Each structure stands twice: as structure tokens, then as C-alpha cells.
Image (cartoon, rainbow, N blue to C red):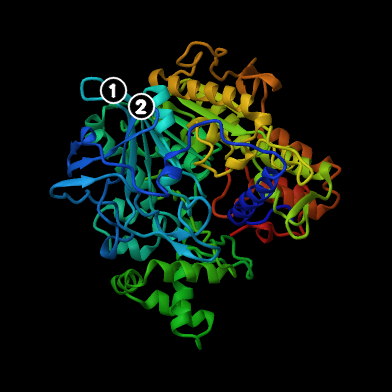
Amino acid sequence: MLLMNKKRLLVGALLLVLFVSACATLLGESKPIFEPSSAALFQGELPQIDPVSERTINAGTLVGFADQYNTYGWLNIPYAAPPTGDLRWRAPQPALAWQGVRPANSYGEPCLQYWGMLAGVPGERGEIVGSEDCLSLNIWAPRTANANNLKPVMFWIHGGGNDSGAAKVYQGHHLAGSQDVVVITINYRLGLIGWLSHEAIRNTSSNPEDASGNYGTLDIIAALRWVQENAASFGGDPNNVTIFGESAGGRNVYSMLASPLAKGLFHRAISQSGSADTTLKVLAEEFADLDNGAPISGLINSSNGLFSSIIQTQNPEDNRAEIRQRLADKPAAELMASLRDMSGAELMSQASKNLGEVDEMRVARVIRDGHVIPKASIYQLLASPSTHNNVPMMLGANRDEQKLFLSRNPEFVDFKFGVLPRIKDVDRYNRVSQYISENWKAGAVDEPAKQISAGGGRPIYAYRFDWDESPKNLLADLPTLIGAAHGLEISFVFGDFKGGVPLDRLVADSNADGRRSLTTTMMDYWGNFAHTGNPGKGRSGAQNNWQPWSATGANIMVLDTPADGGARMSEIRTNVADIKARIPNDDILTSAEDRCEAYAALFLHGYMLSDFWNPQEYQQLGCQAFPALQFRQG
């Protein structure tokens, strides 16, 4: 199989790199180049409250602490009421007020999820961590920021597949202090707590937001509204808000472009390795009838699939038809009351059982409900400035996105002694990574940029992140195995090699100068974009000029170290049509099944229907004997 589940492989790949890098430390690797992050400092004792950081917002008064890079920090600020009990699967409600002065020097809980390295808390595979009471945000601001000296706001949306991750993983002090911006990181509901669409929810809802199924999306919008009302108290300019996010966070950036409810709440947008894909409501709700030739087959963990499996556990003697009838007969209010009485952990465990996994949910995300998210695809909405929130954008992808996932796939990599990775066939490894990584870039950058540009939208600034200077030693060839993989750019954007994707052991004397240079360059560009809507020559004015995306000529900024050519404008066009044209004659796709699986893996996504899926093209590859749904992941 060309692909395995990405979340499981992500955790495995991170553990692999950390293990190999830890071993490499014994062979002479060295320390980080920047100051230790707040995350490391907070593992001992909480930072000391600084009375100068006292601020008053709508819900009350709070006090933070002095952080590095001449900043103040405030942690675990609630932006909405706890979405628990009857508020589960409801739109977020205003935060509850408090009396007195609230200390804001310790992190809040991550939202409910299966443990992984992006949860920001200790745990092990299969363990459910976090809480449903999680709708909080963290703020870092320059100490010079105040109501009379407002700074641009950079609003970070974490990644993690929209079913994992936490705001606490990302430290904003370096970005805030060096770029003179206010950095805000948020938690939002995840997995089936964050996205669940069903007729019973609609029939028991009193407004279209509650009925939408897009609760995680509504959390992000609520946090943006909180920024409009409260950012000035921290010196943040509510009229200059840049949303930015990576992976699923980048997808959520696209969802903010699409949602009418987010109009006017932000003024610039950055999507790092994101996606404009969304989930059709029918896929989010219909049964996964893979075995009876149904014309439309929902996800395994569609709402009907999940609810019926819960009823099955309560009525184990009933057959499938009887279970479905019980579900159909159950009054909506009674059904929803029973589901809200279940713990979040019970719901998640049932979803995992449906997949035969110990730590997976794989549910619908960013659902086209017709209110929060329009029924048209985001790609269609981007074609006209009148059908999306038209703001200046930065769009980017990493050159070797897929290598983070392939690096733990036993189809491609052997593990000597169970841990030391050896690529089985380097040419095939690189080719498969190239296919999927280029397709990722096409969907995240080139195709949206073409749509926006052709429709006369605001300027687009595109990038490709190429850094691949991780240490190479006798234990592992990390530059080939990992390359410029998914998520590696986060540390450069935040100037923090302890937070983000926690690959701090990729830091070495051998790459210190290059990392320092590239980090400075990227923060300079991101900061200038937040200030002006144009990365230009960076805030320092010392960088190569970043030109807008165009249909001809240089269209993309390659981000790399001086040793590998530095940051420079190039013409690199990655089109879905060109990727499709390579599949029939590729020498690594040696059978019809290989070609069909490759096409399905690229264009038939498990929890959403890609805009680029074409059943006629699939059949023309000779795929009549291989129903596409057999390759679907979820």
C-alpha cells in the first residue's frame, strides 16, 4: 500500500527522528541556537507573576508574566464558556466572567484527543488526554505594546489533522518580540467533538450555528471575535489581524476564507502546508456501505455509522438492519441526550473500535453545511472575490511533505534492531514522496493561487520550504529520510526549536549558521506580511524581494539557507493536471493496481471528496477491477 494512516505515521516518524537524533547526540551533536523556550522553563516552576502585566478584558482582570525577547505572556485565557454537558455540539457561548485577578501564568488543558507528541502533555499511545473544557488562548506581546501603541495581531491555528494538537506546543515570545507583533495561539474542539453532522442535531437545534456540525470551525470564529473585542487590552490592533496555521491549521485558514461568519474578523491570511478540501455533508452522515455497491458511501465514522455502532454495543444480539431501524426510530431529543450523557472518551473509544485501532477517530472535518461553510467547494469560492473573504495571502508547502509519513512506513523503510531506519529502495522512496508532496503543493498553493489570481483577488505570495540540512551520521541519513518534511518550517517561523513539531535534536553545530540565517529570513518575511500585507524585503528591508504569484515568470519564493542558494524567487509550477499525466507511464507504478491506488491516494481523500477526483480518469487507467473505495483511508 502506498499510504498508511497519517496521524499514526506522524507520531512514529517524530519518535524515530527523536530516537535517531538522541543517538546522534552521542556522536557529537550540540545545543540549540536560540534561548530555551517557555515550554522548557515551565517544566520546573511557573513563571513569576509580573504586576506590570495586569490587564482588564470583557470577562475580568488577569495578570501574566515577563517572558523572553522583551515580551509579556498570558496563558489559558478563556475565550468561550466550557462546551460541556448540554453545550457539547453547540456553538461556543461567551466566556464566563470571574471575580478578582486571574493568574495567567500556566497553560490550560488541550482539547480532548488521543495522546500524541503534538498534545503537549505526557502520555502513551492509546491514552485519551485533554478535556472538553479547553477553549482557551495564549498571548505574547511586546512590552511596548499598549492601547496607544497597537501592534499587528498574528493569530495561530495549530495543526494535527483537526483531531489532535494544542496551542501550548507553540511559543510566541520570539516571533512577538522580534517582529513587534502580538501573537495569539488558540485551542479549538477536535475530532468528533469538534465536527459532527446529523439530522438529530439539526432537529434539536434552535439556530443554524448549532445545527451546522462545524463546532471546531465555530470555535475559531469565536476566538477571532474575542480578538476584536479584547486584543487592544494587550496592545493588539483589531484592525490588523493575520490568521496563520500549518497542516490542518492551514486547512482551517482556508475555512475562514470561505465562512461568511468570519467576514471582517481578519485582514491577512497565511496557510502553511494547508488544504482547501472540505467534507460533503452526505459523506459526514451516510453509512459506510462499502459492501453493497451503494452509489454514495459515507465515512466509517460518519455520524450514522458512529451512532449505530453505539446502539449495537447496547443491543449486541441485533443484526445490522435492526440496529439501523432502532436508530431511525429513536426520537432526536432522546438520542442527543443519551449521546451527551456519554463521556467524550467513550465516544472516541467507539470510533476507534469501528476502525480496529487504539488511537484513531477519522471523522469528518470542515463540513459543507451551507451556513458556516458554504455548500460549494472552497476552490470554487476562491474564483471570485465576492464569494470568499478576500484578503492578501501567503500560501506555501514543504518540498518533501510526505517524507515525514513515509519514514515510518514498513513498505518503504526497514528498521534494523527495530529502530534504525534503512530505506529499501531510495529511488522509489523519493518518487512516491515526490508524487504526494507535489500534489500537496498543487492543492495547497498552485491551484488556489490560480483561482484567486484569475478571479482578480488580492495578491498571493507563494513559497516552497526546502531546508534539508538535518544531521547525517552512521545511524541514519536524515537528509534523505526526512528532507524538507511536513511541519519542519514551524520552528523557523516561530524561531523556536523546542516547541512546534518537537524535533529539537535536529539542531547541530553543522547546521547552526544556516538555520540561524533562514530563521531570521522567514520571521522577517512573516512579520512584514503581518504589518503590511506584503512580505516584500522583510521588516528589516534586507531580504530578497518577495514578488506576488503570477501566471507567468517567477511565481514562488524558495526558502533555504545561503549554502543551498538562499531565499530566492523561482518559477516552480505544480499543476494537478501534470501530476495526473505522469501516472500512466511511471516506471515505479508497475501494475494496474499500483496506478489505481496512486490515483485514489492522490485524489480520493478518505474524509472528503477532492475537487480533483475524476471517476472517468480513474477508469481510463484500467481500474475497473479496483473499486476506488477500497483504497480510501477512513
Residue 377 shows in the view: no
Residue 418 left/right relative to 180: right
Q: Residues within 10 Å of mark 1 (few under 14, many from 20)?
A: some
Contact (Cβ within 8 Å) of mark 1 with mark 2? yes
Disc 1 and disc 2: Cα gap in Å?
9 Å
Residue 7 left/right relative to 407: left
Q: Which residue is mark 2?
A: 70
Q: Secondary structure at mark 2?
A: loop
Q: Secondary structure at mark 1?
A: loop
Of residues 221 and 208, the one nearer the viewer is 221
Residue in the image at 27% along x and 45% along y = 79
Residue 123 left/right relative to 510: left
Query: Residue 516 is drawn in which quadrant?
Result: top right
Nearest to N terminus: mark 1 or mark 2: 2
Image location (x, y in percent) of residue 195: 42, 55
Q: Amino acid at mark 2?
A: Asn
Image location (x, y in percent) of residue 404: 65, 45
Q: Which residue is mark 1?
A: 144
Image location (x, y in percent) of residue 521: 54, 21
User: Which quadrant, please, contains the C terminus?
Assistant: bottom right
Q: Amino acid at mark 1?
A: Thr
Residue 88 shows in the view: yes
Q: Is residue 255 above or below residue 82?
A: above
Residue in the image at 42% along x and 43% along y = 41
Q: Is residue 335 above or below residue 372?
A: below
Please, which residue is most extreme toward the left here? 99
Q: Is residue 302 above or below residue 95?
A: below
